[in-house]
Amino acid sequence: MRVRLPSLLFLIGLMTLPSGLSAAPKAKGPAEVHAVKTTQEIKIDGIASESDWTKAKPFVTYDPQAKVDLSLKFLYSNDRIYVLASFADKTESRSHKTQTWDDAQQRYRIGLDREDSFVLKWSMEPGPVDLRVDAESAYKADIWFWKAHRTDPMGFADDKMHIYSPLRSANAKLVSSKAGLRFYLSRPGDNGQSAYKTVIHADKKTDRIPLFAARQPKGSRADVRAKGVWKDGRWSIEFSRKLVTGHPDDVAFDRRRAYLFGVAKFEISGRPVNPKLDQPFFGAGEITQMLRLTFD
């Protein structure tokens, strides 16, 4: 039997592949992002006026839920890490779930308005990880959740966690992995007090009244400073946190190591898109591109 040379070479190529592998190209790993050393005092005001911000090379990732490019810069000092996030947004949304009086029901109803937000999601795992809410493996993540209405007035981001597990826990949401496996997503706040509290009104005060009131955050939940400024159709948000907080619910940064993370414009909570909201994808945010931070 005669075998043509191209066919023979193809068969030899297949036999040289390790067992269980195909000739398909390898998936790309996390994109590299670099933090640059600064000796300046960085004021967390959302303006990024310090000259060292120009030394940090911007990294741009696309958020398909928000349909917008998210730009990131990183600085670090001897004891702190700084993040500058910016993205286009036609409107400045600084209200959230405003209570609206219903004359027929004689009570307030929660409004459909949703604040602008931005999320950094840091892996707390020792190795490779998929930080999506449809991942195939369990993980824990440190969440820095900036909220234009609830946390920005006090100059903070909400410091929380994502615990993605096959085991059910209190207040966890049932989600499904890409392969259809059952997982539970819980989103506990860090120990301490948040930068806001809920205020429910039984009697009519005005036609519209905020659901949340600002307050001073405390404990581990007050670790992440953040401030956002909206100008000319664009948000600029600065974050700052100690490299090592000493709290077990926070990722601890070692400048000799690299850290996996992802970002999203909308809250990541595993909720479906809600077309009734003024921002339908709020709550349906997701990590699209895995990133890897190193310290220069």
Image (cartoon, grey):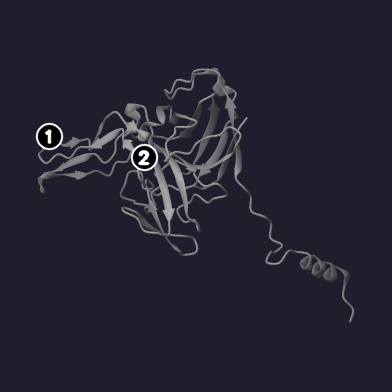
Residue 151 vs residue 80: left or right? left
Location of residue 260 in the rendering, given as x and y in whole percent from the top left corner = 55, 43
Asked which secondary structure carries label 2, the reply is: loop
Q: Mark 1 points at which residue?
A: 205
Q: Residue at x 45, y 64 (%)?
A: 181
Rendered image: mark on residue 227: none
- Between residues 77 and 121, which one lies in front from this camera angle? 77
Q: In which quarter of the image is residue 10?
A: bottom right
Q: Which quadrant: the C terminus?
A: top right
> Total of numbered circles in the picture?
2
Q: Which residue is drawn at 32% across and 31% down?
A: 218
Location of residue 56 in the rendering, given as x and y in whole percent from the top left corner = 58, 27
Q: Which numbered disc flags the more N-terminal residue, 1 or 2?
A: 2
Q: Which quadrant: the N terminus?
A: bottom right
Location of residue 166 in the rendering, given as x and y in whole percent from the top left corner = 42, 60
Above or below: residue 263 compared with residue 7: above
Asked which secondary structure carries label 1, the reply is: loop
Tell me the amino acid under the disc marked 2: Asp
Seen as rendered, the residue at the extreme bottom is 1
Nearer the camera: disc 1 or disc 2: 2
Q: In which quarter of the image is residue 245?
A: top left
Location of residue 176 in the rendering, given as x and y in whole percent from the top left corner = 43, 60
Badge 2: residue crowd in 10 Å (few <14, some 14–19, many ≥20): many
Q: Mark 2 points at which residue?
A: 190
Q: Which residue is drawn at 19% across and 36% down?
A: 208
Tell me the amino acid under the disc marked 1: Lys
Q: In which quarter of the image is residue 201?
A: top left
